[in-house]
Amino acid sequence: MITISSSNGLEITIPHDRTHLASMKSLDGTKLRRCLQCGKCSAGCPMCSFMEHPPNRTIRLLQLKNVEQVLADRSIWYCASCQTCSTRCPRGVGPAAVMDALRQLWWQRQGRSEEKVVQLANRLFLDNIRRFGRQHELRLGTLFNLKSGQLLKDAALAPKLLAKGKLKLRQAKTRNISEVARIFARVEQLRQEGGSR
Amino acid sequence: MTGVREALIYGYYPGCSLHASAKEYDLSTRALFEALGIGLTEVPDWICCGATPAHTVDELLSLSLCAKNLAIAETVPGDLAVPCASCFSRLKTAQHELTVDLARRNTVARVIESPVPLAKNIKHPLEIVGRDWGLEPLTAAVKKPLAGLKVACYYGCLLTRPPEVSQLDDAEAPTIMEQVIEAAGAETVSWSHRLECCGASFTLPRPGVVVKLTAEILAAAKDAGADCLTVGCPLCQGNLDLRQQEVEAQSGVRYDLPVLYFTQLLGLALGLAPARLGLSGLMVDPLPLLKLKGLL
């Protein structure tokens, strides 16, 4: 277990290793303690209706050191990263950055979470970049449907996109694909060494 | 116009969408810039910025992909033009983060095996046309004013937020898009949802989210009396246009609102042919509306 104490007195205790510590530092940096529950973040959040814990409650749970409860719930995966909350927060807490830090923490631990679909999409999206250097929309959509077991999801859109020439059947690799692969490899290596921060 | 304008030249980072599902944004940006005499040089071998999936789960990867692009962009002259709001936001965020966090910058430099250049100005085409080129010369260059066309300008989230990163305009009450569209002779409507998020990052995993959010945006634009929407982001355009039929089927309301890139509307006002602007690439056909208003 590791306890992180921030300069403003907030302590968060998490089950441990160096990579978790790395991520929690960015949580600490967002000055969670400053939140006084005005609720402005949740009032302006377009995704609030999809969340069990809206942004202000997530911040409160973190103040109460309920990190595990927040990570296990799917709410953090329903943040659209639209930055409305961080733009409007009168206390500079930056809930959008908190959501990112929580998701990164989860990603490193791959622990229990009720949300699998968004994570599958993220994984396939990043895998395409590693393979091609750029996004390959057709491959992304097809693999997502196959792996999520929703074979006919958006099937009606594909012919329309193809007819308009909006779906490339093939994505050429960028000429610097070996450099891209090295970026992915080094990021992974740093994570394993606990130095990705 | 008096005097000789200094030639404007920019590097160009189109991003993945503009090479595929949003190719008409690429076409119309190039056509518009050419018509205005603005030079564009595409950054060679640019790579994906990582978009939302990278920054939500792996900050170092997100920063590194963007930093790699900033390094490659040093090989082309001029400020960097970035039409996709997501790429624009990611590249600017990386620049911002790595400027204030030296330790992070050193780590990223190790990852990309080169120093991270942070000096290049990253600009959205809205500010290039509206500020660098200028509204007055733009008004003067208009050959076919978009008279009688009521346009709902839709900013979405990342063009203006967070303001310390984007620095495009006021985050709560931006006007740059309205100014540019009005310079083209169109009328802009005052409406409620121009800064609401369309849920772009959920278009693959949770399309139901997108349908709900875009339904609200389309309804608000329609209520405000708009004939069409205009956008400066391929993800907003994709959601509002491509999923409009789905929204109509679910809500039982017919919107029939074409969603044009602002570059397409400006191109029309400058007298460019629809084919050069990729108008046929849009799902909700804008031609009947443009003909009805006598603009084609």
Image (cartoon, rainbow, N blue to C red):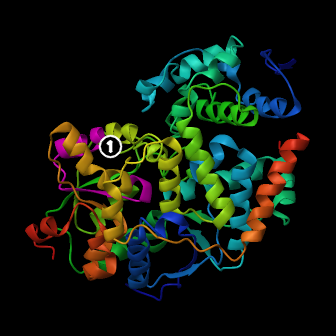
Q: Residue at x 60, y 29 (%)?
A: A95
For the residue labelled by badge 1, is the local secondary structure a helix, a strand or a loop? helix
Q: Quadrant of the C terminus of chain A?
A: top right
The magenta span reads: B215-236
Q: Residue at x 56, y 58 (%)?
A: B87
Residue B47 percent coordinates (x, y): 64, 67
Residue B233 visible to the viewer:
no
The residue most toward the right is A193
Q: In which quarter of the view is residue B31 placed?
A: bottom left
Q: Report if residue B222 lies within the magenta region.
A: yes
Residue at mark 1: B214
Residue B67 percent coordinates (x, y): 73, 60
Q: Which chain is disc 1 placed on?
A: B
Residue B202 percent coordinates (x, y): 46, 43
Q: Report if residue B77 lies within the magenta region.
A: no
Left or right side of B165 for B39 = left
The residue most toward the bottom is B4
Closest to the observer, A124 or B121 = A124
Left or right side of A172 for A162 = left
Q: Quadrant of the N terminus of chain A?
A: top right
Closest to the observer, B78 or A15 = A15
Closest to the observer, B106 or B191 = B106
- Above or below, B246 against B115 in this view is above
Left or right side of B206 for B268 = left
Q: In which quarter of the view is residue B3 placed?
A: bottom left
Residue B285 visible to the viewer:
yes
Disc 1 marks a residue whose amino acid type is Thr
Q: Residue at x 54, y 63 (%)?
A: A136
Residue A25 percent coordinates (x, y): 80, 31
Q: In which quarter of the view is residue A166 placed?
A: bottom left
- Above or below, A71 against B186 in this view is above
